[in-house]
Structure formats: C-alpha cells, structure tokens
Image (spheres, coloured by chain):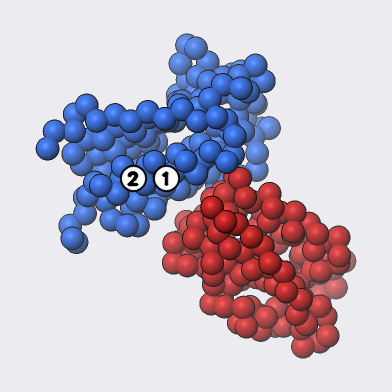
Chain colours: A blue, B red
Amino acid sequence: MDYQDDVVELRIPRKPEYVSVARLAVSGIAGRMDFSYDEVEDIKLAMGEACTSAMKDVAPEFAASPLTVRYEREAQRLTIEVINPGGARSTSKAPESLPPDEPISRLLMEVLMAEVDVFEDADRNLHVRMVKYASREDE
Amino acid sequence: MDFSVATKDAALANGQPAVVAEVVGEVDVYTAPRLKDRLLQFEREGKRNIVVDLAQVGFIDSVGLGVLIGGLRRARAGGGTLVLAGPNPRIRRILDITGLSSAFTVVQDVPEALEALNREVAGSKPAAAQGGT
C-alpha cells in the first residue's frame, strides 16, 4: 500500500489536558503500522514528552497559540513533529531556567525514538521532529 | 480518563506512622499536580514514610517522575523515605532508562513496600545527620 501522502495534522490548545489527545492519536496511527505493542507505547511516551515540553516552553505573547502535531506515515517509518509557536529558545527561556524534568523528558525522547531533531525556524517556532522505524518481525 | 489518589494509613514495626498512596490512572502533565498535592499534604502532616502504589498506573511521563523525585527528596529530608510498589514492566523500564530505579526502592507490592520501609527506617540515621541526595 502507498502511504506516501498519509499525513495527519492535529492542532491542540496549549493546555495539559490535551496532551493525552496527541498521545491517543499517535497510538491510533502507530497501532496500524508494523510496530510492536511496546514500540507503540514508546512512541506515545515520546509524543507526550514533546508536547509537554512545548506547553512549558513559550514566549508570553504566544501563550494562546495552539500547538501543531504532525504525523507522517510511511510504510516502515513514522515521523512525528510538534510545532511550538514562540517556542524558539532565543525568545522563550534561557536554558538554565528550564524546568527540572526537562532533561528527563529529552532523555526519554532520545532513547525511545530512532531520531530526534530540535530546531527553530525564522518565525520563532520550535520544531521537535522524531522518527521511529517499524521493524516488527514477531507477528 | 479517571485519575485518583487514595490514601491509607499504616504503621511500621517500630510504631512510626506510614502512609500508602494508591494511584489509579495515567500520571502525566495534567494529572501529576494532583499527586504532588497529595505528597505535599503528607509532608505537612508529618508523614515521612510513604509508599506510592503504582499497580494501577498504566502510564507515567517525565512530569510524573519529577513529582515522585520531589516526594522522595522531601521524605528523606524529614528522615523517612518513599518506596514505589507494583509498577508494571513498562514503568519499570522507564525507571531503568532514566536511572531512577537506582534512586528509588522499587518492589512488587504494598506489603513488600512496607517491609522495605521497616528495613530502611530501622537502618536510617536521624534526619539531621543525613546527607542530601
């Protein structure tokens, strides 16, 4: 099957209660790919960490801007991107003022996903892009 | 999604009070503040020997882990400790990945956690003599 253009986008309010919505959505997408149960759970956790970091990390003038979560499905690869308006480090918080659980959050994303890329764009958006490759051979 | 923290008082072999917090649901950025409030309440009430029962927790994120770390730190500062009981294999794996399984005492269930508290409290020094971690 051709999944070349299978992209799902979700816009969620920047409120903690909506992080679970992003997790549920990725569970629905990854659950239909060749990921094991544990891999789907890993993706859900990494997804939640990216959104949670974005919730806490924003310039005041962007506080009401929703987050965009983008899921891109390919045959054996799932790419997730969380786009945080106003989350660029240069405009939000100095690294030394980040919440104490931020290092744990980043560690979890790095360990649970195959690739994690964090970058800023010219519009002061912070992007967290994560990739997981499906390689299930047991079922 | 239901989330709750039920509290049950217990006593250690030496007569010191202990408390068991039975957590049900997912512990994430939305629900973790409620667990934190409960742990802060324990501190205000002088309850320093704490079991957090995770047997009915299906998910925990970094915010939830941060709340548990804070609870452990405050319990130790008061001369007690905080023991984790019954985490599922997924949560045990997260504790391993983050290195927290070496910071916490992690056991199978609440009775084992109370035994661990008995051992740790019996072997601990007065709060003033303890170093921070």
Residue behind mark 1 = A24
Q: Does B16 sit left or right of B69 as displayed?
A: right
User: Which image quarter is the C terminus of chain A in?
Assistant: bottom left
- Cα distance in 3D space between marks 1 and 2: 6 Å
Q: Does B33 sit left or right of B14 as displayed?
A: left
The part of the image, by quadrant, that contains residue A86 is top right
Q: Are marks 1 and 2 on the same chain?
A: yes
Q: Does A131 sit left or right of B79 as displayed?
A: left
The answer to whether residue B122 is seen in the rendering is no
Three-letter code, disc 2: Gly
Q: Where is residue B47 in the image (x, y as percent from the top left)?
A: 81, 69
Question: Is B60 placed above or below B85 here?
Answer: above
Q: Position of residue A115 (x, y in %)?
A: 35, 38
Question: Is A53 placed above or below B11 here?
Answer: above
Q: Does B35 sit left or right of A113 as displayed?
A: right
Q: What element carries label 2?
A: helix
